[in-house]
């Protein structure tokens, strides 16, 4: 690699995915495109999103409620457009994916089915300092079951002086609590450090002691390699407004392994949209679930939110998710190379990358612990038209994503960062 603008432009010229940037609306200021590295918080808007939503609005205006059944694309079957491309992204069978609600709601619903404490087997293992919505979900769900979070929730932290959590410590905790463990519910990718976890090993270890394994994939879906079905994961949930570019507050999704689809002993909260499709409109008493992941649906979905999601998923399908993963890794590798150069040119290290460097343990996100004037540097980046993320007390997160970010933008970011640190 070279720390050179011409080299970055060469990488862009050779990039087979470069044309997909034109599919998105890039933020601009006075006609100048900004560098948007916040796809890990909210993905950019595809240009086609407005037309997809407008088609739904036109159906509504033309048919009213009958748009569920009439027109070229009846809403009743809209979900079918989503599950195949989404299944390819998360490594699942289409029947194992359901698009519904939002992330934390879906986590609660999955907890109803997969956290079934019995006697002393009531503990949950999770990562310490998980994203707050997960923490609050755990706390309130466990309390609602009459249990004390302090007694049943086991949090695993990095070792003293380290930023990431070692796999061996996760597996050791699972073995330690083998007799009283009911569930391992872990993040696929840590929102703060960008660490990708070995989900297969965690799943295997949980199953070996008789516990269930589920994952919050908020920062993993649309970003890193997932093989949920192959790994035997019991369930997973994710949002679609980050790497999946489906808009603020976009509809979420869940995965349920096929072995549970016709398990009638499984507890669940039910609603009429999860009722068996052929007889749903008979409105009969007694819940009969759809024999797929769709059986976990509760309420009538919003076709408008489905349309926004579909607009982005079609771009993913056209690009090919394996291709996107390769470019995403190349972007972050280039960024890590440039950040190392900044440290090497300084009298002493000015930043510390707290994201793992091996490709199996990172995705698009790179998190930097700033040793000097971090907030001032961050503010300078914003003034220079670079969208990054500040996390207290002194971490800057950036996520160059393969659909709409370029190698030249990565180079521009590093150059601006270097200048800001020097000044």
Image: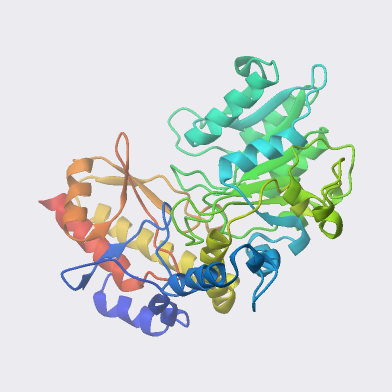
Q: 228 and 12: which one is in front?
A: 228
Q: Taking 74 as reference, is 252 left or right?
A: left
Task: Identify the residue shown where x is 63% and y is 39%.
Answer: 107
x and y percent of residue 235 in the render? 72, 46
x and y percent of residue 212 in the render? 77, 37
Q: 227 and 420: which one is in front?
A: 227
x and y percent of residue 195 in the render? 51, 47
x and y percent of residue 20 in the render? 44, 78
Task: Identify the residue shown where x is 64% and y is 44%.
Answer: 215
Q: Can residue 164 be seen in this view?
A: yes
Task: Identify the residue shown where x is 37% and y is 58%.
Answer: 336
Q: Taking 352 as reference, is 375 left or right?
A: left
Q: Quadrant of residue 229?
A: bottom right
Where 41 sits versus 371, above or below? Answer: below
Where 311 sits versus 240, above or below? Answer: below
Q: In which quarter of the image is the N terminus?
A: bottom left
Task: Identify the residue shown where x is 51% and y is 64%.
Answer: 308
Q: Residue furthest left?
A: 423
Q: Taking 89 as reference, is 13 left or right?
A: left
**Number of marks in the image?**
0
Q: Can residue 2 be seen in this view?
A: no
């Amino acid at each position: 690699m070279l720390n050179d603008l011409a080299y970055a432009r060469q990488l862009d010229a050779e990039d087979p995915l470069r044309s997909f940037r034109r599919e998105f609306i890039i933020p601009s200021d006075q006609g100048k495109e900004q560098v948007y590295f916040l796809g890990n918080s909210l993905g950019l808007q595809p240009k086609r999103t407005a037309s997809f939503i407008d088609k739904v609005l036109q159906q509504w205006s033309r048919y009213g409620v009958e748009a569920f059944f009439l027109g070229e694309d009846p809403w009743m079957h809209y979900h079918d457009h989503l599950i195949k491309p989404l299944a390819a992204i998360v490594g699942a069978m289409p029947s194992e994916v359901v698009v519904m609600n939002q992330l934390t709601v879906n986590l609660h619903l999955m907890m109803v089915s997969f956290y079934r404490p019995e006697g002393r087997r009531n503990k949950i293992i999770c990562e310490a300092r998980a994203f707050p919505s997960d923490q609050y979900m755990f706390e309130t769900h466990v309390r609602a079951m009459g249990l004390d979070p302090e007694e049943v929730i086991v949090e695993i932290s990095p070792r003293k002086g380290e930023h990431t959590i070692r796999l061996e410590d996760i597996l050791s905790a699972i073995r330690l609590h083998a007799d009283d463990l009911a569930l391992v519910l872990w993040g696929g990718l840590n929102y703060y450090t960008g660490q990708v976890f070995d989900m297969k090993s965690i799943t295997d270890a949980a199953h070996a002691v008789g516990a269930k394994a589920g994952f919050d994939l908020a920062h993993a879906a649309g970003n890193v390699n997932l093989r949920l079905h192959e790994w035997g994961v019991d369930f997973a949930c994710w949002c679609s407004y980050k790497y999946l570019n489906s808009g603020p507050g976009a509809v979420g999704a869940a995965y349920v392994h096929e072995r549970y689809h016709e398990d009638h002993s499984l507890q669940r909260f039910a609603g009429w949209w999860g009722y068996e499709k052929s007889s749903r409109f008979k409105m009969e008493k007694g819940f009969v679930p759809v024999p797929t992941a769709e059986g976990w649906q509760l309420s009538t979905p919003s076709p408008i939110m489905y349309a926004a999601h579909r607009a982005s998923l079609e771009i993913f399908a056209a690009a090919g998710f394996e291709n996107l993963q390769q470019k995403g890794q190349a972007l972050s590798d280039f960024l890590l190379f440039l950040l190392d150069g900044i440290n090497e040119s300084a009298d002493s290290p000015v930043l510390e990358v707290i994201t793992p460097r091996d490709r199996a343990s990172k995705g698009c996100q790179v998190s930097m612990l700033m040793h000097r004037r971090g907030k001032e540097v961050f503010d300078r980046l914003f003034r220079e038209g670079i969208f990054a993320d500040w996390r207290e007390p002194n971490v800057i997160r950036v996520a160059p994503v393969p659909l709409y970010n370029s190698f030249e933008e990565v180079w521009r970011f590093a150059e601006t960062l270097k200048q800001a640190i020097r000044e």
